[in-house]
Image (cartoon, rainbow, N blue to C red):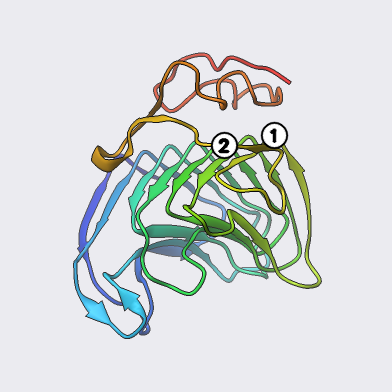
């Protein structure tokens, strides 16, 4: 278990985004805070933050929840067991080709995450993607590579596209200051599908209103 840590000034890893956590799968990664080291290298403008699970086909997937990532992304590996990724806040464009906040690779479940200037990338296999807020400017909020499949429900996106059941501005309190609470009247309020325990609590631990 990796819980309640702060990772700062993250550099490069294999020429790509920094790997703050690079461990065998099957772990709980919870309530960690990640910030990058501001540098420039190729197409990555400002190194990002990677939280990924290493290859171990014998292990089951992990749980990644309640983490805050600035210019980072969560990814799993194709040979790992399915991961459950929920209630994370991921924001800031790293300048990468996909600007991914979450990349799925092996039947992962992605619930109740907030992504700002980031997107969800279905890269391999299949995925379940529900109740996410993905506001990525004029760019696609969810992309799915050829040969992949996904079950989508009640995702709010900034523009219409794959997996976007609700379209509009989520009306964050102050995204420029990284306050991603929702203002009164946000189209995301009461727009989620019921998922049950443990997904019925939001990032602040408040019981999540459930709509259809």
- What residue is shown at x 61% (from left), y 18% (from top)? 190
Residue at the spot of label 2: 168
Looking at the picture, does residue 196 appear above or below residue 109?
above
Q: What distance separates the C-alpha of mark 1 from that of mark 2?
A: 12 Å
Residue at the spot of label 1: 154
Q: Which callout, 1 or 2, points at the residue further toward the start of the chain? A: 1
Helix, strand or loop status at disc 2: loop
Is residue 162 at all visible to an observer of this figure? Answer: yes
Helix, strand or loop status at disc 1: loop
Residue 203: mark: none
Quarter containing the C terminus: top right
x and y, in percent, of residue 123 in the image: 66, 68
x and y, in percent, of residue 181 in the image: 38, 27
Q: Nearer the viewer, residue 166 or 14?
A: 166
Question: Quadrant location of residue 89?
Answer: top left
x and y, in percent, of residue 120 in the image: 58, 55
**Drawn side of residue 32 relative to residue 139, left or right:** left
**Drawn side of residue 13 relative to residue 107, left or right:** left
- What residue is shown at x 23% (from left), y 78% (from top)? 40
Task: Count neighbours of disc 1 (C-alpha within 10 A) and say few if under 14, some if 14 to 19, many if 20 or more.
Answer: many
Looking at the picture, does residue 12 appear above or below residue 64?
below
């Amino acid at each position: 278990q990796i819980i309640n840590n702060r990772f700062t000034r993250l550099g490069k890893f294999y020429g790509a985004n920094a790997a703050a956590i690079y461990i065998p799968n099957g772990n709980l990664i919870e309530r960690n805070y990640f910030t990058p080291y501001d540098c420039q290298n190729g197409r990555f403008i400002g190194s990002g933050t990677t939280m990924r699970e290493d290859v171990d086909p014998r292990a089951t997937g992990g749980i990644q929840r309640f983490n805050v990532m600035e210019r980072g992304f969560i990814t799993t590996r194709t040979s790992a067991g399915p991961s459950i990724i929920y209630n994370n806040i991921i924001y800031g464009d790293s300048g990468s080709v996909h600007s991914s906040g979450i990349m799925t690779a092996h039947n992962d479940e992605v619930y109740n995450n907030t992504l700002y200037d980031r997107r969800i990338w279905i890269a391999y296999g299949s995925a379940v993607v529900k109740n996410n807020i993905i506001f990525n400017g004029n760019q696609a909020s969810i992309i799915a590579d050829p040969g992949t499949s996904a079950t989508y429900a009640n995702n709010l996106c900034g523009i219409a596209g794959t997996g976007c059941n609700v379209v509009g501005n989520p009306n964050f309190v102050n995204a420029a200051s990284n306050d991603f609470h929702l203002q009164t009247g946000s189209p995301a309020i009461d727009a989620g599908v019921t998922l049950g325990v443990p997904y019925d609590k939001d990032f602040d631990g408040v019981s999540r209103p459930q709509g259809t």
